[in-house]
Image (cartoon, rainbow, N blue to C red):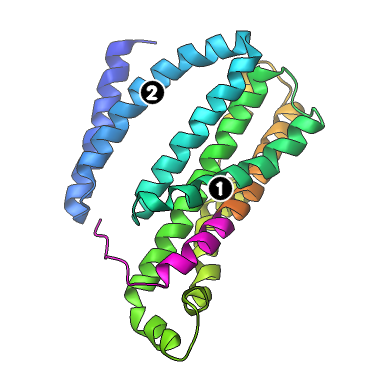
C-alpha cells in the first residue's frame, strides 16, 4: 500500500468529518480527531499483539479480557453518568458477549482456532459495547427530558426503577436498530467485512456467507442482552435524581 496516498485520503476524510461537524454545530470535533489518531495507533499495536497471540493461544484469552475492560470503560464514558456505572456496563457487555461466544466455542463452529475465535469474539464485544452505550444514552436522555413525569411517579409511591420503567423498551429498541438494519441489509445493500475478508482469504462464497450470518445473528443476540441489562442496571440509579443534561 502506498503510505503517502493512504495518509492523504485519511487526512481528507478527517477534514470532511470536521467540516460537517462544524457546519452542523456538533461539539465532537476533538473527539473525532482523537478517535482517528487512537484508531491508527491502537490498530497498529494490536496487530502485533494479535500476531503474537495467534502463536500463543493462552494469551488470546488475556487479550479478550483487556478488550472487554476497555469496552466497558468506553461505554461508561459514553453513557455519561460517572464511573460508578462501570460495573453495570461491564456486566452488560460481558453477558452479551458470553451468550454469543460460548455456544460458538462449545460447538467448535469456527475453524482455525484462535485465528478465527479472537476476531469473532472481539466483534461481538464491540457490538455489545455499542448497544450498552446507545441504550444507556437514550435512557439517560429520556429521563432528563421527562423528569417531571418521574417525580410524579415517585410522589405516588413508585420506586425509582418503576418510575423510569416505561422508558426502557424504547431505549433498548433504539440500541438494536443499527444491528437490525445491518442484518437486513447484508448482501442487498452491503457486503459485511467478515464476508469480504473470507472471500479474499480464499473461502468459497457459501462458506463466507455462513460465517457472516453467524456473526450478524451473534451480534444481535449479544446486543439484545447487553442493551437490556444496561437499561435494567441503570434504571434504579436514574430514577433517584435527575441526570445532568449532556450536550453534544
Mark 2–mark 1 Cα distance, whole angstroms, equals: 24 Å
Q: Secondary structure at mark 1?
A: helix
Q: Which residues are magenta?
A: 227-248
Position in image of residue 29 (x %, y %)? 21, 43
Residue at numbered disc 2: 42
Neighbour class for label 1 at 10 Å: few (<14), some, many (≥20)? some
Position in image of residue 134 (x %, y %)? 45, 55
Q: Secondary structure at mark 2?
A: helix
Position in image of residue 8 (x %, y %)? 25, 21
Report whether 108 appears left or right of 153. Answer: right
Q: Quadrant of residue 219?
A: top right
Q: Is residue 151 above or below residue 78?
A: below
Residue at numbered disc 1: 91
Query: What's the residue at 74%, 26% (across, down)?
Result: 110
Query: What's the residue at 56%, 40% (across, down)?
Result: 190
Query: What's the residue at 54%, 9% (across, down)?
Result: 52
Q: Quadrant of residue 14?
A: top left
Does the rendering let one see residue 187?
A: no
Residue 182: say if magenta: no
Q: Is residue 133 above or below residue 213?
A: below
Q: Give the quadrant of the N terminus.
A: top left
**Cβ–Cβ below 8 Å for labels 2 and 1?**
no
Q: Residue furthest right?
A: 107
Q: Residue furthest bottom?
A: 156
Does the rendering let one see residue 110?
A: yes
Amino acid at each position: 500500500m502506498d503510505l503517502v496516498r493512504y495518509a492523504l485520503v485519511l487526512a481528507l476524510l478527517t477534514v470532511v468529518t470536521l467540516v460537517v461537524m462544524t457546519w452542523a454545530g456538533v461539539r465532537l470535533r476533538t473527539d473525532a480527531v482523537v478517535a482517528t489518531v487512537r484508531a491508527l495507533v491502537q490498530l497498529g499495536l494490536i496487530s502485533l499483539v494479535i500476531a503474537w497471540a495467534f502463536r500463543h493461544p493462552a494469551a488470546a484469552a488475556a487479550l479478550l479480557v483487556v478488550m472487554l475492560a476497555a469496552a466497558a470503560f468506553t461505554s461508561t464514558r459514553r453513557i455519561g453518568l460517572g464511573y460508578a456505572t462501570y460495573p453495570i456496563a461491564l456486566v452488560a457487555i460481558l453477558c452479551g458477549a458470553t451468550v454469543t461466544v460460548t455456544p460458538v466455542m462449545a460447538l467448535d463452529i469456527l475453524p482455525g482456532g484462535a485465528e478465527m475465535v479472537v476476531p469473532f469474539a472481539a466483534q461481538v464485544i464491540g457490538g455489545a459495547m455499542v448497544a450498552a452505550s446507545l441504550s444507556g444514552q437514550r435512557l439517560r436522555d429520556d429521563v432528563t427530558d421527562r423528569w417531571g413525569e418521574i417525580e410524579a411517579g415517585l410522589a405516588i409511591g413508585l420506586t425509582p426503577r418503576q418510575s423510569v420503567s416505561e422508558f426502557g423498551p424504547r431505549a433498548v429498541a433504539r440500541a438494536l436498530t443499527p444491528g437490525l438494519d445491518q442484518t437486513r441489509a447484508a448482501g442487498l445493500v452491503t457486503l459485511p467485512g467478515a464476508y469480504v475478508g473470507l472471500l479474499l482469504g480464499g473461502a468459497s462464497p457459501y462458506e463466507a456467507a455462513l460465517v457472516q450470518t453467524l456473526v450478524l445473528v451473534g451480534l444481535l443476540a449479544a446486543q439484545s442482552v447487553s442493551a437490556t441489562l444496561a437499561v435494567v442496571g441503570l434504571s434504579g440509579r436514574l430514577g433517584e435524581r435527575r441526570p445532568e443534561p449532556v450536550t453534544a
